[in-house]
Amino acid sequence: MIKQKALLAAALVLGSGVAMAEQAYVGANLTSMNFNAGQDLEAAPTNLSINAGLVLGQGISAELRLGSTVDADEFKDTDTEVEFNEAGGLFVRASVPDTTTFTPYALVGYSSINLETNSAGGSTEERDHDIAYGFGLEYKVAGNMSVGAEWMDYYRKDGVDLVGYSLTARMGF
C-alpha cells in the first residue's frame, strides 16, 4: 500500500510538473553505498542509478531515481555478500539559482531499498523505505552538461545506516 501511494505521488508530482517545467534533465550516479548494521557488519557495494527530473521553478526540481548494485561487497570476516537489487526514491532538489560554474544543492525525499544478502547458508531479501536527505555540488562542464559529487543519507532505522557517496553526471534538455 505504501509503495502504491509513493508511486501515485511520484506520478502526480512529475506529471503535473511536465506542463509547467522550464527544463527536464536526466543523469546517472555511481555510488558507494556504505551499509552499517553495527557489530562489524559493514559493507560498501557500488550502485549505479539513473535519475530523471523536472525543474519546477527557479532552483526547485522534482527528481526520480532508480538503481541497482553493479559491484557487491562482503561483510568483514564473513562470506556474506551484500547488494541492493533495487534502490530508488523520489526527491525534491533545491539548488542555488543563477550560479555560473559551481552549483550547490540539497535533496530531501523518500527512498526505497531492497537489500539482498547471499552466503553459503542461503540468501535473504529485505525491502524497506525511509526519509532521505543529502547535498551535493555540481560543476557545469559545458552548456547543459554537469558533473559533480554528492552525499546522501538514504536509510537510518533500527541500528542500520545506509549512506551514499556519489559521482554524478547530468544533462538538461
Image: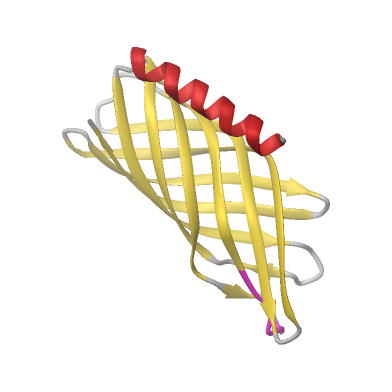
Name the residue at 51% across, 53% down. 165
Q: Compared to 118, does 100 lie above or below?
A: above
Q: Quadrant of the C terminus?
A: top left
Magenta residues: mostly which secondary structure? loop
Q: In screen coordinates, is 154 left or right of 37?
A: left
Above/below status of 127 relative to 53: below
Span highlighted in magenta in the image? 77-82
Residue 79 drawn in magenta: yes
Outermost left residue: 143
Figure quadrant of the N terminus: top right
Residue 169 vs 79, above or below: the answer is above
Residue 147: x, y in percent?
30, 45
Residue 47 coordinates in the image, percent (x, y) = 49, 60
Seen at 66% across and 60% down, the residue is 115
**Coloration of the structure image:** secondary structure
Asked where in the image residue 142 lies, by quadrant, the reply is top left
Note whether 78 is above or below 94 in the view shown.
Answer: below
Q: Residue at x 36, y 22 (%)?
A: 55
Question: Which of the two residues, 144 or 90, is positioned nearer the viewer here?
Answer: 90
Q: Count all numbered tags in the image, as a single digit.
A: 0
Taking the spot 68% from the left edge, 71% from the top edge, the residue there is 117
Residue 3 x, y percent position in the rendering: 65, 38
Magenta stretch containing residue 60, yes or no? no
- Residue 51 placed where, x, y %? 41, 42
Question: In terms of image quadrants, where is residue 26?
Answer: top left
Residue 143 lies left or right of residue 123; in this view the side is: left
